[in-house]
Image (cartoon, grey):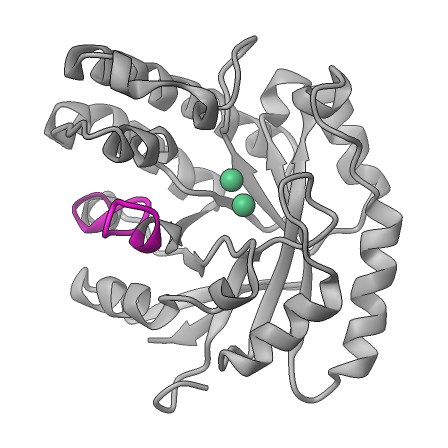
Amino acid sequence: MINGRIIADLHTHNDFSFDCHMPPEQAYAATLKNGADILAVTNHFDIDGVLDGIYGSYDADADRRALESARETYAGRLRIIRGIELGQPHHRPREAQEFLARNDFEYVLLSLHNMRDVPDFYFWDFKQMTDEMCRYWLERYFSQTLELLDFARENTGRNYALAHLTYPYRYMRQAGRTVDFIRFRDKLAAIFEKLVSHGIALEVNTSGYRQGLDMPMPHGEIVALYRECGGELTVVGSDAHKPEEFGDDITRAYELLRDCGFTYTCVPSRGGFERLAL
Ligand SMILES: [Zn+2]
Ligand SMILES: [Zn+2]
């Protein structure tokens, strides 16, 4: 709890993610130390990267065992949700569907880290691009996000959230680029209509605060548009990869949600999304 508020960090990584080097025990201890009450473990499974051999494989069973053991250790102190950050399932829908059928996740974060046949935006050099090129790629990113959301429509019965909408913008901003998102209003509204009709939550990802954006992904203006489009389901996550990042800036995101008119955020459970008062 922080200032009497329940803190739910619903996007975190540990050793079972290819880009994180931290034993799960350290992650759980850090979560408690940093004042969080609810934690979703959402290690990476970027399906095209794994199947094409670019990333190492994801050991779902070992991840589950570590989580179950932590549930015993931290019983009564920390609620631990078994989730997954599923990257680009629409690139390999059949395999993604089989993967979800094999694993009983309570929560699925849908991510678009890369477009088809190109590397993760993390590897792009936006310093070499004009603002115009950045706008072009953002447009493509939003279009493909619409395709990503169709995966959830075709594979119902799970708690889905759309992770870090505006993800490429993190790297554009780090490269000194700025983009006015007004031009994407219609595209964003189309994304939000799909979120609402498919029952998918919008994630407010606080990593942007600490990674050069000084705002979350997506930022307030876009979260406000989601609400305008009838969006009610939100989740908040830090995208922690290091101990000090667990629970980071969650209260700041809660404040942003309140400013946008939300009275609650959500926590996934077996019965669907539970409400958590803001
Ligand atoms: Zn991600
Ligand atoms: Zn992540």
- Above or below, 152 against 271 in this view is above
Q: What's the magenta bit mostly, secondary-structure-wise? A: loop
Residue sitting nearer the eye, 29 or 10: 29
Residue visible at 74% across and 48% down in the picture: 16
| Residue 227: % across, % down | 24, 51
Residue sitting nearer the eye, 193 or 113: 113
Does residue 271 belong to the magenta stretch? no
In the visual, does 203 lie left or right of 213?
right
- Above or below, 94 against 243 in this view is above
Highlighted range, magenta: 209-222
| Residue 275: % across, % down | 45, 71
Q: How many labels does the image show?
A: 0
Q: Can residue 80 be seen in this view?
A: no
Residue sitting nearer the eye, 63 or 109: 63
- Above or below, 36 against 83 in this view is below
In the visual, does 171 lie left or right of 267?
left
Residue visible at 48% across and 46% down in the picture: 199
Residue visible at 57% across and 56% down in the picture: 12
Q: Can residue 116 be seen in this view?
A: yes
Residue visible at 81% across and 38% down in the picture: 101
Say which quarter of the image contains residue 79: bottom right
| Residue 121: % across, % down | 44, 24
In the visual, does 240 lie left or right of 213?
right
In the visual, does 254 lie left or right of 19?
left
| Residue 172: % across, % down | 27, 28
- Above or below, 216 against 154 in this view is below
Say which quarter of the image contains residue 180: top left
Quadrant of the frame with the C terminus: bottom left
Residue sitting nearer the eye, 154 or 64: 64
